[in-house]
Image (cartoon, helix red, strand yellow):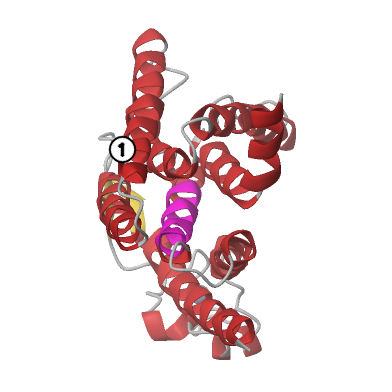
Amino acid sequence: MVTALVTILVTVFGLVAGWLSAHLVHSYVEEADTEIAVRVDPTCSHCEASIALGDTAPPRWWLRRTMCPLCNHRLAWTWIAVQLAVPVGSLAMLAAWGPNLVLIPFLWLVPVLVVAAVVDARLMLIPRRVAWIGAGVGAALIAVVSVIGGEPGAIKSALVGGAAYFGFLFVMSMISPRAMGFGDVRFSLILGLYLGWISVLLPAVGLFVACILGVVLGLGVRIGSRGQQRHFPFGPGLALGTLIVIAFHEPILSRLIVT
Ligand SMILES: [Zn+2]
């Protein structure tokens, strides 16, 4: 009964967060030659009409076959992808943690990861605010839930994880600024915080999975663009790697600790 109720709540949360996230993702554009993302009204890529928040509200927008309200062409696939990725990711977190207080910080993490990954895929940069506000609110939620749950020691583990992941990517970006932008370094703070909160062993696993995914996604982009696109963003691999490791933290940790 509790599980069913929480499943409904998490689904509704995911749909609303996904709706808002899709709007936020598509409101970012890159300011010319600055590598800084600024926010404008999102527009239809076909007719350039402004898309208001209400235009893409599910389920009404889904019944309109995800079309632009003005020109009736479908909006870019990334709109619906974000709207679906957030509820799916949120339900994956529910499956990993159950109807538990610990779930709440992870429900904040999912939209942050999706927004950062998709903006990075579109613009090759991760907005500063997304990275810093994401990590700041995430750290606060982690601290509150750790204290309420009677495990204040877990806060230290989260901070160690955040510092380790951030530090490692920072060094990588110093060695090879072309391969690793500072946006990825900023973004790694929230990843390390959450992975470290579960176990100080997990940031290393998350980075390993992210690197594999980064190579696979990068090759996919290169093949898809027939070798024309040489650079690819690392953010989607980092985000997806983190979500996968969190979703499967139990089997991963039982294997790591036994061997
Ligand atoms: Zn249009």
Res. 168 image quadrant: top left
Write down the residue under mark 1: 156
Q: Nearer the viewer, residue 138 or 171?
A: 138
The picture places residue 120, in percent across and down from the top left corner, at 45, 43
Q: Residue at x 62, y 45 (%)?
A: 249
The picture places residue 219, in percent across and down from the top left corner, at 70, 28
Left or right, 17 with reference to 78 = left
Res. 78 image quadrant: bottom right
Query: Hey, what amino acid is under mark 1?
Result: Lys
Q: Nearer the viewer, residue 203 or 129?
A: 203
Q: Residue at x 62, y 59 (%)?
A: 96
Secondary structure mostly seen in the magenta stretch: helix
Left or right, 154 with reference to 240 = left
Quadrant of the image for the N terminus? bottom right
The reply to whether the residue tagged 1 has its Cβ within 8 angstroms of ligand 1 is: no
User: With respect to residue 198, does 172 lie above or below?
Assistant: above
Residue 225 visible to an observer of this rendering: no
Counting the numbered discs, the total is: 1
User: With respect to residue 136, does 99 lie above or below?
Assistant: below
Q: Nearer the viewer, residue 212 or 73?
A: 212
Magenta region, residue range: 105-118
The picture places residue 226, in percent across and down from the top left corner, at 73, 30
Is residue 153 located in the magenta-colored stretch of the structure? Answer: no
The picture places residue 6, in percent across and down from the top left corner, at 55, 81
- Could you tell me which secondary element the residue under label 1 belongs to? helix
